[in-house]
Amino acid sequence: MKSITIDGKLFVSVCSADELIPEKGKKIIFDDDIDMEVSIFKIDDEYYCVSNICPHKHQPVIYNGIIKDCTVTCPAHGWTYDLKTGENTNKHQGIKRLKKYQIFEKDGDIYIEKPELEIPKWRQ
Ligand code: FES
């Protein structure tokens, strides 16, 4: 796995840019821990990387969500998140947001900020 450090932050190459299908998510798993899973998306030639775990009921399904206007809708119960900010677009559903990670393309490879493992309270 190729890696680059920028301003002290580690970015790892996770796939080639050609592997991303526009408006279809791709799941990336690190270290076999569910809280290290992220989803990456390509929409209108921009890349987005968010946690794959929906903060509603902690389902690892965001990669399989429905994309519309730069939002992703969780296929489990329909909560919708803005991919630019991670925020829930419907405040009536709550204020829990998807974690966001930096992502970029370099020389045909997709690099993302490697997530830090943080065990959420509900798993402790
Ligand atoms: S788990 Fe995603 S909306 Fe319920």
Image (spheres, grey):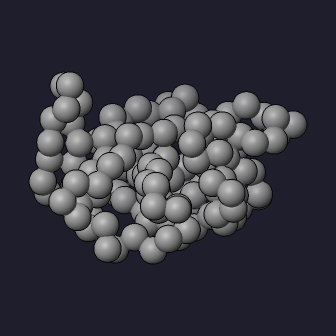
Q: Residue at x 43, y 44 (%)?
A: 35
Q: Residue at x 38, y 40 (%)?
A: 102
Q: Is residue 12 above or below residue 1?
A: above
Write down the quadrant of residue 59 in the picture. bottom right
The reply to whether residue 34 is in sight is no
Residue, far top: 7
The percent coordinates of residue 81 (x first, y second) are: 67, 47
The percent coordinates of residue 43 (x first, y second) are: 52, 61
The reply to whether residue 54 is in sight is yes
Which is more toward the observer, 74 or 43? 43
Count numbered badges in the picture.
Answer: 0
Q: Is residue 39 left or right of residue 102?
A: right
Q: Residue at x 35, y 57 (%)?
A: 29
The percent coordinates of residue 101 (x first, y second) are: 41, 40
The percent coordinates of residue 20 (x first, y second) are: 40, 70
Residue, far right: 92
Q: Quadrant of the N terminus?
A: bottom left
Write down the quadrant of residue 4 in the picture. top left
Q: Is residue 83 above or below residue 76?
A: above
Which is more toward the observer, 3 or 94? 3
Q: Residue at x 44, y 33 (%)?
A: 119
